[in-house]
Amino acid sequence: MDAGPVDPDKPFAALLSHATILDQLRLAYPQGAPIAPPGFNFDPGRFRNAAFFNHMYGDCRKGEVEKHLTSVVWLPRHRSQTLRFTAVNGAADRLREVSAEIDVLPPSLARAAYPSAGTYSCRGVADAGQPSMHAYGAAIDLNLKVSDYWLWEAGKAAKIVPYRNRMPKEIVDIFERHGFIWGGRWYHYDTMHFEYRPELLNTTR
């Protein structure tokens, strides 16, 4: 699979819609950093090469993803849900570990994680057209009531995105330890969203 050329002048819209494999790595994800408004167009992890992920997880439009999905019981001590998540690369196992750690947090923190707003969904990203990580069964959205999303706040035509977040850092830290990146680290923020991207993180595995 071709990694593609490195073009330092590649427009942001092209990075979203036609990322190479190397484009995926051009922004360093700030694992463990304090929560703060990201810089302009700082979206580490949003540049995704569809061919790369289709090869890894399958193409949901061809029915290739669902055969790899497995059940994950989410937060059984607080509000048990059964979610579908990909077993590829151990992703479902990592989500189970995340669930176990969040489940023992105080209710004032854990409430941000339930109910889940969804995992697998064969769809594209709203502003990019490329497959969402939900289309691979490798992403989870958390409680909508404590979530903030740039398109909700600013609208599709907005040029200035006022950052907002209500997701506790304790939950973010747990996900990041297990190989997930958080949409709240993005300039185009999506604070309910976590996706399994261990290649962008320093983990013990």
Image (tube, rainbow, N blue to C red):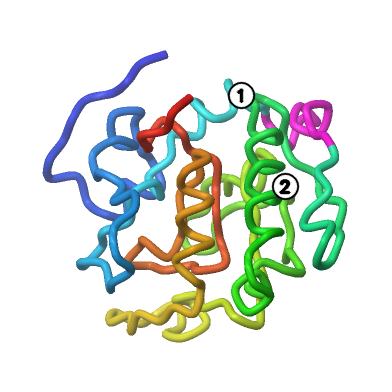
Instruction: Say which quarter of the image contains residue 10.
Output: top left
Question: Going 53% across and 50% down the picture, which residue do you hit?
Answer: 175
Q: Is residue 71 or residue 69 the one in the foreground? A: 71
- Residue 203 falls inside the magenta stretch: no
Identify which amino acid the numbered label 1 is placed on: Asn
Q: Is residue 158 left or right of residue 26?
A: right
Which labelled disc corresponds to residue 205? Answer: none
The part of the chain drawn in magenta is: 59-70
The residue under label 2 is 122
- Residue 69 falls inside the magenta stretch: yes
Q: Is residue 197 or residue 114 the one in the foreground? A: 114
- Quick one: quadrant of the N terminus? top left
Task: Give the x, y percent position of residue 86.
Answer: 72, 34
Q: Is residue 177 left or right of residue 65?
A: left
**Label 1: which secondary element:** helix
Q: Is residue 49 left or right of residue 83?
A: left
182 vs 66: above or below: below
Most extreme residue toward the left is 8
Identify which amino acid the numbered label 2 is placed on: Cys
Q: Is residue 190 or residue 92 the one in the foreground? A: 92
Question: Going 83% across and 27% down the picture, which residue do you hit?
Answer: 67
Viewer-nearest of discs 2 and 1: 1
The residue under label 1 is 89
Q: Earlier in the sequence, mark 2 or mark 1?
A: 1
Task: Give the x, y percent position of residue 173.
Answer: 45, 55
Mark 1, Cα crowd under 10 Å, few <14 / some 14-19 / many 20+, is few
**Label 2: which secondary element:** loop
Question: Going 36% across and 62% down the picture, which residue do you hit?
Answer: 186
Q: CA distance from mark 2 to mark 1?
A: 19 Å
